[in-house]
Image (cartoon, coloured by chain):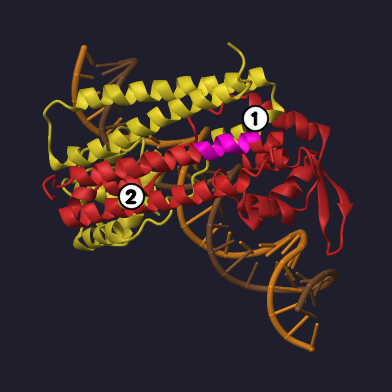
Chain colours: A red, B yellow, C brown, D orange
Amino acid sequence: MSLRHALLGLLVDRTASGYELLKLFETSLANVWPATQSQVYGELTRLADNGLLEVAAQGPRGRKDYAITEAGRAELLHWLLTDPGPDSPRRSSTLLRVFFLDLLTPEQGRAFLEHQVRRAATQRDKLKKLRNSLDWRESGMLTANGRLVLEYGLRLSAMQQEWADWAARQITPGTT
Amino acid sequence: MSLRHALLGLLVDRTASGYELLKLFETSLANVWPATQSQVYGELTRLADNGLLEVAAQGPRGRKDYAITEAGRAELLHWLLTDPGPDSPRRSSTLLRVFFLDLLTPEQGRAFLEHQVRRAATQRDKLKKLRNSLDWRESGMLTANGRLVLEYGLRLSAMQQEWADWAARQITPGTT
DNA sequence: CGAAGCATGTAAGGTGTTACATGATTCT
DNA sequence: AGAATCATGTAACACCTTACATGCTTCG
């Protein structure tokens, strides 16, 4: 149940409409906690019902500006201070495929892993570009956390690339 | 919808009951594609209904031994050869927390990250022990894939440990 | 005989995805 | 005027988790 906390977090120092929050999910939070339009609007209504958010203002096209309440701040803080536990069950269809990779020919297996190398490299490039576009001296506190998360993404994609490359070379080692 | 493929994969070179498959999920597949009892039994019934599996034999306590069919093999192969796409949306409540870490005091933030360092180290130790217990010369093809996946886990936890350590040092750099 | 393990199944509830549906406002 | 964008909402379906429910067999 972290979607609610993501929303609360985004509303800590500004008010916003569902539509704006949705955009934030597509950009900043896309790599950490993706959410769809349905989910966002639904959860906002629920949060307002529970008194963690309130509608601060109504705008042009039925637009509702949400603001966090004291109860909302308390809930967010509480969530931040609780142990996330083993990071939510990590399912990876890619690794599952690797588990059964011997059902393919060595060529097909290598091709699969080399595809993963390229996928990771592409992701890494994307994040590098994001970092460069972000570094423009725009250092609010907000950006500091974002940089930590971004660095995680960079390290992850680097690791994935190296691993896939290594794994590809494990299959039929003698292929010059 | 990868659970079905995990089941098909496990049944490629042996028949097994739901109970046995469940144990396999708890051990070998736990870190790649966890599944609960409810899920396994339900999916097995569905797979049999769809003709991808068949009940090869009935045992002592209502035990059903499932065997993969030709249709099942075809489906599994097809799945292995399709692009997994960007590996299923990766949600991490830990990274989400990091995103909002500036809402805590620097001490609390550092404590959180240092906790992650230890969590990753523990996980890494667990996997190392698993590798050592596994290396006992038991090299079927099956184990080869498992070793690739295990190596991924080792590299991932190492990366996480290093990252969390680095991130902790980013917060309030001057704390001797 | 009692405990542990084998063995399967159902039901309720939460979360997430996709698709459908509608309408207002701004910009060209 | 028409297109793009802003803006919200609902419904159906898939998937996963937890809990409940039941009963047989083997081992000590």
What residue is pinned by disc 2?
A117
Q: Secondary structure at mark 2?
A: helix
To which quarter of the image does residue B36 belong?
A: top left
- In reply to whether residue A49 is colored magenta, the answer given is no
Judged left or right of residue A49, residue C19 is left
Judged left or right of residue B14, residue B30 is right
> Depth check: B133 or B115 in front?
B115
Q: Which residue is rendered at x = 55% and y = 33% of the image?
A: B94
Judged left or right of residue A108, residue A62 is right
Q: Secondary structure at mark 1?
A: helix
Which one is in front in this view, the residue at disc 1 or the one at disc 2?
A: 2
> Depth check: A33 or B6 in front?
A33
Q: Which residues are magenta?
A: A144-151
Q: Position of residue A120 (x, y in %)?
A: 39, 49
Identify the chain of the residue marked 1, using the numbered disc in the image.
B
Task: Work out whether disc 1 and disc 2 sit on a shared chain.
Answer: no
Judged left or right of residue A141, residue B90 is left
Whether residue B157 is visible, yes or no, is yes
Disc ID at residue B101: 1
